[in-house]
Amino acid sequence: MDPARPPGPSELVRASSSPRPTSEPGVRVRFLYASPLFSGGNVPALDTRADLEGLRAASGICAEVRVATVDRLRGALLARPSPGILHISAHCLRSGGNLCLALEDSFGAPHILPASDLATQGPWDGVELLVFLSCHSEAFARELVRSCGLRRVICCSFVVLDQAAQVFCGAFYQALGAGRALLSCHEIARAAVRSSADERISMEADKFVLLGEPAPPQNGQPSALWSPALTSVALEPWPSWPRWPSVEDFVGRQDFAVAAARAFEHRRVLCLAGARGIGKTAFCHGFCHHFSAPGGRRFSAGAFLVDYVSTVRGAAGEHPDAFALAILNELRAGSSRRPAPPGEEAGGGANGGAGPAQALTV
C-alpha cells in the first residue's frame, strides 16, 4: 500500500493489531498521551507514535495505551490493582504565569490542567513510578512528591528535544523490561542519549532527572533499589497508528476540526462543501489522521476514504450505484471488525461514554 495514500474501499482489512498471546508475565505500563488541537496550530503535535515504538521494541513491557483526558487520568489513578508504572506524554505549558499540563477533552480540544488540579485527580501514592518526559515536568513532579506522596518520578528539568526523549524512552524501557533496577535503567537511558551521534541529542542527557531513588536509608541501613514486579498481564492488541498521512503545514483548521468532532456527537453525516482548491480534502485527511489515533479518540475504530471519481471509474459502468455500494462495503467491513479494547467501549470511549468506538467513512 502507498503510505502517502489513505485506505480506500479495496483495502478493507485494517491492520489494527499484531497477533500477540492473550497474557504473559511482564512489566505493566499505563501509557496516557495527549496531543490536542490547539487553536491556530501554535503548539506542535507530539510524535506519540515514536514514543510507543520504544515501548513496543522493549521485551517484557506490556503497555495499555489511552488518550489522556482528565477522566482517564483519574481512572488510571483509581484503578485496582494500582497503576504501577504510569507514563504521561503531554505538553507542559505556561498559562497565566502558571505551569499547566495540556490534556485533551472528548472532542480533541485542549483541557488545560494546572499543577494544583493535577494533584487532586486521584491517589498518586499508589503509583510506583511516574514517567513524565515533558519539558519542565520536574516542577510538576516535585509538587506531586511533596503533596501527594508520589514515590518515584522520571522527569525533565528544562526544555528537552523530542528526539532525545525518544532515545531515552526506548533505552529506559528496554532496560526495565530486562529486569534491571530503576536506578540502573535511568543511567543506561541517559548514557544512550549521551552517546547519540547527533550532538544536539547528546547534550540533553543531564536533563532527565530521577526523583525518589535511591530511597532514604531506613534505620541507618541503605534501602534496597526498586525494580518493578513482574505480573501476569492480559494483553491488548498492540495499537496501530492511523494509516492516513499527516498533512504538512496543517494550520488554521484546528477550531473547525473540533467543531466537526462536536457535530458528530449528534449527527451521523456531515457534508463539507466549498470551492475547488480551498482545502476540503486536506482537511478531511488531517481530521481523520487525528481522530483515528488509537486509545479512545472519536474514530479510533478506523477512518476510511471512498473516492467518488476513482470508485466510479473502477466500476467501468458495471453498476449504476457503484459509489453507494462502495460506502455500504466500507460500513459492513467496519461493523465486522474486532471489538474495541477496554477503555474504548461504551462508558469509556473518547465521546465521554456516549457509545462504542466509531468508524468514519469519508
Image: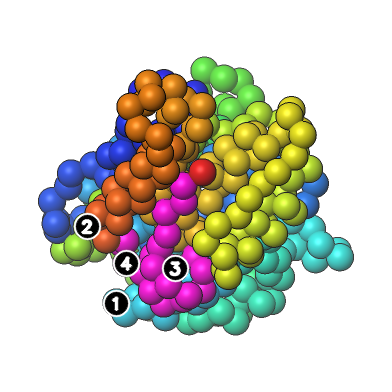
Which numbered disc covers residue 284? none
Q: Distance between the residues labelled 2 and 1?
A: 15 Å
> Residues in magenta?
340-361
Q: Viewer-nearest of labels 4 and 2? A: 4
Dot 3 and dot 4 residues touching (CB under 8 Å):
no
Dot 3 and dot 2 residues touching (CB under 8 Å):
no
Q: Is 342 part of what is drawn in magenta?
A: yes
Using the image, determine if residue 248 lies above or below residue 332.
above
Q: Which of marks 3 and 4 is nearer the N terminus?
A: 4
Measured as percent of width and height from the top left, residue 32 is found at 47, 59
Nearer to us in this view, 244 or 63: 244
Disc 1 secondary structure class: loop
Which numbered disc covers residue 235? 2
- Name the residue tied to disc 1: 81
> Which residue is located at x 69 percent, y 76 percent?
116
Identity, as a three-letter code, of the amino acid under mark 1: Pro
Q: Which of marks 2 and 1 is nearer the N terminus?
A: 1
Question: Quadrant of residue 201 in the image?
Answer: top right
Question: Quadrant of residue 317 in the image?
Answer: top left
Which numbered disc covers residue 349? 3
Identity, as a three-letter code, of the amino acid under mark 2: Leu
- Name the residue tied to disc 4: 342
Measured as percent of width and height from the top left, residue 107 is found at 61, 63
Q: Viewer-nearest of labels 1 and 4? A: 4
